Image (cartoon, rainbow, N blue to C red):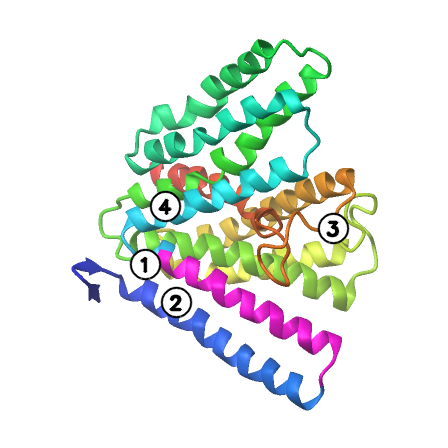
Amino acid sequence: MSIYGYHIPTNVLVALLIIFSVLVTCTIAFGILNKVKKSKLSTELLTRVISWWWIAGGVAVIVAAPKVFGTVIIAYISFVALREMFSIGIFRSSDRTAMFFAYFAIPVQFYLAYNNYYTQFLYFIPLYMFIGVPFILVLTGQTEKIGRSMSVIPTILIQTVYLLSHLVLFYNIEIEGYESGPGGLLIFLLMITAFNDVFQFTWGKLFGRHKILPKVSPNKTVEGFLGGVISSAGLGYFMYFLTPLEPWQSLVTGVILSIMGFIGDAIVSAIKRDLGIKDTGNIVPGHGGALDRLDSILITTPIFYHLLIAYLSF
């Protein structure tokens, strides 16, 4: 199918149709439930599914529109996440100049990703920003607790900008004979990551008995984690048609992304526990802040990209 001259692969359209069909079904079901027997749970479910419409809309643009639109949206999400981290963190007044400077990493990093300047993409933030930010902090002349700021600000840049910008690199992957294109890869990644959270939550609620990280995330259990890994492996296997991978490779990828998603969620949970907050923000009703939604995808994105390159190089 083509829209204004831009071709959208059939597999991508089918996947999007499935996603929005599920959303329509859930919206109707939760809406009826909320009217027939309104409760705190039914209201929360309806709020969450409405929020997922916004998220799914963004995903649809990212995977189906020309890459310039997807790049702008991802860059904006990165900006929101960076701003969110700066707003909840503990910083000195003298850190503001370095924090302002950090925002300029976003257009540069995404420009490099968009144009597939891969080598420069890889070292811009880990090298130049890791040198530039500390030097700006030095220029302020305020040395008290400067080591903490030198560590925290560049790390936040890695987390919210560098890792997420790998999403744009998928637009530049061209594989002979592979029809689904970047949209297929992005849907595969986003669906595995999103449903892994759902799987781990559901299995944990049903069978969870043993805490896996009691001091970091008390609600997560060994049973939920294992159920999520197995379910994500199955989902990866059945969604192999969206990728250039063999079914067994998609299954293995589902396992790896599930584990990496758990790690990403645990990292952000630890940060929130350290700061004594439940959510990083309230930008997504019923879902918290941007970082609450990005916690897993921040880790799964670069892992999937480099794993895919490794598969294709054999």
- Find the magenta span and give its range: 38-61
Q: Residue sitting at 60 percent across and 12 percent down?
A: 140
Is 47 in front, or is 314? 47
Give the labeled residue for mark 4.
Answer: 72
Other residues around mark 1 within 10 Å, as few (<14) / some (14–19) / many (≥20): many
Is residue 50 covered in magenta?
yes
Can residue 184 be seen?
Answer: no
Q: Name the residue under label 1.
A: 64
Mark 3 lies on residue? 278
- Near mark 3 (Cα within 10 A), the count class, few <14, some 14-19 or many ≥20, is few
Circles 4 and 2 in contact, beta carbons < 8 Å = no
Q: Are marks 2 and 1 in contact (CB under 8 Å)?
A: yes
Query: Which-is-in-front pick, marks 1 and 4?
Result: 4
Q: Is residue 147 visible?
A: yes
**Relative image position of residue 19 (x, y in whole percent):** 45, 69
Q: Residue at x 29, y 41 (%)?
A: 172
The residue where tag 2 is placed is: 16
Q: Main secondary structure of the magenta part?
A: helix
Callout 1 touching callout 4 (CB < 8 Å):
no
Which tag is nearer the camera, tag 4 or tag 2?
4
Query: Which of the 4 quarters of the picture holds residue 4?
Result: bottom left
Q: Which of marks 1 and 3 is nearer the N terminus?
A: 1
Q: How far apart are marks 1 and 3 (CA)?
A: 34 Å
Q: Residue at x 79, y 43 (%)?
A: 276
Q: Is mark 1 on a helix, strand or loop?
A: helix
The three-letter code of the residue at mark 2 reads Leu
Secondary-structure class at tag 2: helix
Height in image: 57 above or below 76? below
Secondary structure category for the residue under label 4: helix
Amino acid identity at mark 3? Lys
